[in-house]
Image (cartoon, rainbow, N blue to C red):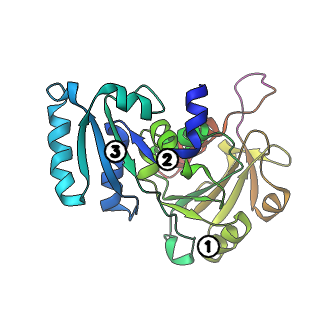
Amino acid sequence: MKKELEKIGNSDWLEGMSSISALIKGMSNNGNDRKIIRILFDKSKIRSKSRELAFLKAKSNELEFCIELVSSEIINAQAIGNTHGGIIAECTPRTLPCLTVENIVDKGVYFILEGVEDPYNFGYAVRSLYASGVNGIILGERNWMGAAGVVARSSAGASELMNMYVSEPASAIELFKAKGYKVVCAGIRDSESIFDTDLSYPLLVILGGEKRGISRNVLDMADKVVRIDYGGEFGGSLSTSAAAAVFGFEILRYNR
């Protein structure tokens, strides 16, 4: 854990084929402007991972990055985790565009994630939202996308595929309302059950972190405050990633 905490703030290294292949797809599909500078490939895995190496060699010509065959010790010294499989990629930072009304599709679903304080929780939330078919996520200027390696790994690469935009929540809400979107915040006070709520598209959902929650001015701008009902007595709150999964897939079910 100490090793990970020391490197989280400087992690423009993506680890493992899931993260790297997701980035390569994202560069082609959604305008992700992150670039691969070089890939370090464990030379002891040339045979066992020959297909992965062949794929990366083909993409290296197309995307203009180099592949270095190195020892596992070099890779382990650079990597944060232990699930890289002997393949890591040094990358440039990703630039997130500012949200404009042109970025918003007519009948979609978007999420604002406000105040998430842990990069793993953030990554898990992104994974669930991407899997449930969310069109995009809006983040504040200060967000976890600088910790690219951790977020990509915990999101199984979804962070490199998801459309993401930067905006202050209040400004984003105004843009979405101008496009005819309903705005719901996750919360408890003066709320209605998610199972009784109209979740039809177009929809903007705002989720807050477990500690700070959603700011008062954002709650006041919402059309509804919506809660997740529990199946038994529980005095705590769900993690942001768990709440994201519930909202994402309940919205998907509602709009089948």
In the picture of the structure, the residue carrying the numbered disc 3 is 20
Find residue 133 and name its label.
Answer: none
- Crowdedness of circle 3 by 10 Å Cα count: few (<14), some, many (20+)? many
Q: Which callout, 3 or 1, points to the residue nearer the camera?
A: 3
Residue occupying image coordinates x 34% and y 59%: 27
The relative height of residue 6 versus residue 99 in the rendered view (above or below) is above
Image coordinates of residue 79 in percent, x first then y, are: 43, 33
Closer to the N terminus: mark 2 or mark 3?
3
In the picture of the structure, the residue carrying the numbered disc 1 is 180
Image coordinates of residue 101 in percent, x first then y, are: 56, 76
Closer to the N terminus: mark 2 or mark 1?
2
- The residues bearing labels 2 and 3 have C-alpha atoms spaced at a distance of 11 Å
Closer to the N terminus: mark 3 or mark 1?
3
The relative height of residue 46 versus residue 162 in the rendered view (above or below) is above
- Crowdedness of circle 2 by 10 Å Cα count: few (<14), some, many (20+)? many
Residue occupying image coordinates x 51% and y 42%: 151
Find residue 148 and name its label.
Answer: 2
- Crowdedness of circle 1 by 10 Å Cα count: few (<14), some, many (20+)? some
- Mark 2: secondary structure: helix
Residue occupying image coordinates x 47% and y 59%: 94
- The residues bearing labels 2 and 1 have C-alpha atoms spaced at a distance of 33 Å
Tell whether label 1 touches label 2 (CB within 8 Å). Answer: no
- Mark 3: secondary structure: helix
Q: Considering the image in quadrants, where does the N terminus appear?
A: top right
Image coordinates of residue 115 in percent, x first then y, are: 72, 49
Q: Is residue 191 magenta?
A: no
**Identity, as a three-letter code, of the amino acid under mark 2:** Ala
